[in-house]
Image (cartoon, grey):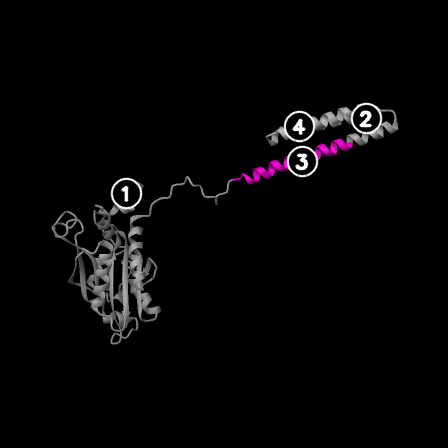
Amino acid sequence: MEINDLESMKKQIISDLESIKTESDINKLNSQFRKYTKSLYSELKGISSENEKKNFGKLINDFRSEIERLIENKKSKFKDDNASNEYDPYIFNPSIKIGNSHPLIKLYKKMEKFFINLGFSIVQGPEIELDRYNFEKLNMPAFHPARDMQDTFYVMSPKVLLRSHTSSVQIRSLETMELPLSIISPGTVYRVDDIDAQHTPMFYQVEGLVVGEGVSFAHLKYVLISLLKETFGNSTDVRFRPTYYPYTEPSAAIDMSCPKCNKKGCRLCSQAGWITVLGSGMVHPKVLEDVNVDSEKYTGFAFGLGLNRLAMIYFGMSEIKKFYENDISIWNQL
């Protein structure tokens, strides 16, 4: 055994460690190193001189300690590198394509911005509703024929149902919020309708309510005419027709000029030149009294629109059910 042999082996191992690329290669080198040190200790037993055995024993121990340290350092480095290369789900991948907003959301956000600028608040309510909020407190008792127009799905008949309009949110707001108030209540509603080009049993609705002192029909006209002109352009004409709703009096159906033919008549407006887009009216005094609001002091107006139908006109779509078909190519076009 020679000192030069240990130095030569040490240099060789250090060189091999520097060129190693995988943890598997480190383990292989470590195995070879242990076999080599084992053979050194075997040779040490054959040395007869105590001093020589002591000196070479120290050299072998120092050699073994240093090489073991270098191998452990290399292993630690690989572990640190692997840890830093682990997949991080929070790192944004710039190659991911961001999808488009759903057309109903696009149109709603446009309308929401309009109402917020007028000082309206956004109020949400439950989709599973009580009969008294969906019908009774809106001047539609159990025997009222107007319930047939809004026939809905019952969870626990006859008192628990899927709301047929978001007017129920208006009643809840009148019971809990201070007057005056100006709110819109968007959300999904349900009715027992057959599926066709214009109807689905589930659709999105936006309703509004303004209650305060001195609120008049003129205020209603200003808000809704401004809404339609803001949404469809200043050239849009708007007309009000008398109609009936049990929770408003007087009531008005609101038509707007067809944006496609400009009142000349086309397939979109069924050759009428006008399209009915909103229902509205002054809040019925009985509705106010049923929620303990003084109808002599306070007046208000309410309105409601089916966002799906309005979106069909806005985006020029022919069938309402396409809003619920996950055809991304349609969203890319709108």
Which stretch is magenta?
A: 61-86
| Residue at (25, 64) in percent of width and height | 302
**Secondary element at tag 3:** helix
Q: Main secondary structure of the magenta part?
A: helix
Q: Choose top left, top right, bottom left or bottom right for residue 99.
A: top left
Q: Alpha carbon of mark 1 to alpha carbon of mark 3: how far?
A: 59 Å
- Label count reads 4
14 up-or-down from 208: above or below:
above
Left or right? Give the position of 199 relative to 102. left
Q: Quadrant of the C terminus?
A: top left
Q: Amino acid at mark 4?
A: Ser
Nearer to us: label 2 or label 4:
4
Q: Earlier in the sequence, mark 1 or mark 3?
A: 3
Rendered image: mark on residue 99: none
Q: Earlier in the sequence, mark 3 or mark 4?
A: 4
Q: Point out the image quarter for the N terminus.
A: top right
User: Image point 28% across, 75% down: which residue?
Assistant: 294
The residue under label 1 is 333
The amino acid type found where label 3 is placed reads Glu
